[in-house]
Amino acid sequence: MSIVITGDLTGFTKLKDTSRRKLTEQTKKLFAIWQEHPGYAEIFRGDSFQLLFSDVETALKRMIQIRCWFIKSSPDQQKPVLDAKMAIGLGAVDYIGTTVHDSDGEAFHLSGRSFDALDGEKLKIITANTELNRQLDVITNLMNLVIESWTTGQAAVIFEIIENKTQQQIAKELGIGQSAVNNRIRLSKWKSIEQTINYLIDTLKSYN
């Protein structure tokens, strides 16, 4: 089973031209670090992206980090204008080309079609199991309510937590006190999101 993330950056047009170009280049560099093989993570048209993963845990954590990445890049710290909407498809991959755009299979179809059908949703996980999808919709909708409330500072901290950095390391990297890091973790309700992610990982690994 493979996992395909198809997404779009929201609020991109609210940035100045120079800011859009800078964010696009920075995102390309980030995805290049994340990709399992060259071409497995691409950003195109400036605000659209697609990534291919072979591991459920990695894919779900990157899913959260992608939203953190864009939220924390917003110019307004308290009311971020940037975010991402994504559809994550789990299934077989029949063919892998030189890039994700040349590849094909169930995971791509589920992700692409679900992304096209998003109606105000920011996050959707889709499988070939209809009953499981209903459960996933409930979970991701609740997750989204929490993530949408994150400030740029909270998103920056959560991004680094997923990188397995300690609070001391995060504080030093962001130039803030450890108490501020702890406060952002608490206000972001990260412990609840983390529990939810771990539940999703276990559930989807069982589905596999």
Image: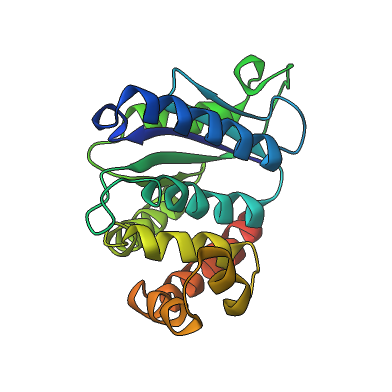
User: Which x, y percent locates residue 200?
Assistant: 52, 63
| Colour mapping used in the image | rainbow
Q: Quadrant of the N terminus?
A: top right
At 44% across and 24% down in the image, what residue appears?
Answer: 21
Instruction: Note whether residue 84 is visible.
Output: yes
At 47% across and 30% down in the image, what residue appears?
Answer: 22
Instruction: Determine which quarter of the picture holds residue 206.
Output: bottom right
Instruction: Determine which quarter of the picture holds residue 18.
Output: top left
Return the residue found at the far right.
37
At 31% across and 63% down in the image, what residue appears?
Answer: 142
Return the residue found at the far bottom.
179
Horizontal side, residue 40 vs residue 191: left or right = right
Q: How many marks?
A: 0
Rendered view: 40 above or below 180 = above
Which is more toward the observer, 83 or 108?
A: 83
Rendered view: 162 above or below 121 = below
User: Which x, y percent locates residue 30?
Assistant: 61, 40
User: Which x, y percent locates residue 170?
Assistant: 57, 70
Which is more toward the observer, 185 or 119?
A: 185
Instruction: Note whether residue 91 is visible.
Output: no
Horizontal side, residue 122 vs residue 109: left or right = left
At 63% across and 25% down in the image, what residue appears?
Answer: 105
Rendered view: 79 above or below 90 = below
Instruction: Determine which quarter of the picture holds residue 96.
Output: top right
Rendered view: 46 above or below 89 = above
